[in-house]
Amino acid sequence: MKVMIRRSPEIGLSIYVPKKDLEEPIVEFEHESLWGGWIKIANGWVLDLPEMAEGTTLPITVNAKKRGEEE
């Protein structure tokens, strides 16, 4: 699914899922750089993010895979 990841002073890191009209803060992540690992958002979803360069600027739209969904 396409998600937009951004950083804001009020929330910190958050994602927006356009098809669900859902915006949630990122509460936990596997890697400090975010990329190539999983993230957990406030509603409990765990998403796998693609590999990206460590200095990738935000906001950015990427394809993420929700864990537990069928291929």
Image (cartoon, helix red, strand yellow):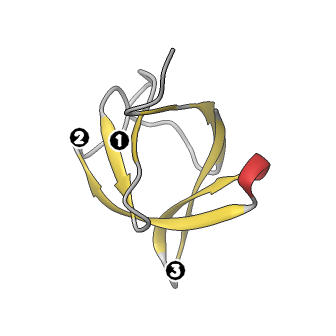
* Residue 66 percent location from the top left of the image: 46, 35
* Horizontal relation, residue 64 to residue 59: left or right: left
> Could you say whether the residue bearing mark 3 is in a helix, strand or loop?
loop
Counting every numbered tag in the picture gives: 3
Please report contact status of discs 2 and 3: CB closer than 8 Å, yes or no.
no
* Residue 7 percent location from the top left of the image: 53, 64
Q: What residue lies at 41% left-to-right and 21% top-to-bottom?
A: 51
Please report contact status of discs 1 and 2: CB closer than 8 Å, yes or no.
yes
Q: Reading the chain from its start, which is encountered first: label 1 or label 3? A: 3
Provide the residue designation for mark 3.
9
What amino acid is at disc 1?
Answer: Leu
* Horizontal relation, residue 54 to residue 62: left or right: left
Q: Quadrant of residue 30?
A: top left
* Residue 13 percent location from the top left of the image: 46, 63
Q: Reading the chain from its start, which is encountered first: label 2 or label 3? A: 3
> Could you say whether the residue bearing mark 1 is in a helix, strand or loop?
loop
- Callout 2 crowding tier (Cα within 10 Å): few <14, some 14–19, many ≥20: few
| Of the two numbered discs 1 and 3 in the rendering, the one whose residue sits closer to the viewer | 1
Label of residue 58 in the image: none
Relative height, residue 38 to residue 26 (above, below): above
Label of residue 34 in the image: 1
Farthest-out residue, bottom = 10
Provide the residue designation for mark 2.
31
* Residue 34 percent location from the top left of the image: 35, 41
Name the one closer to the observer, 44 or 39.
44
| Of the two numbered discs 2 and 3 in the rendering, the one whose residue sits closer to the viewer | 2
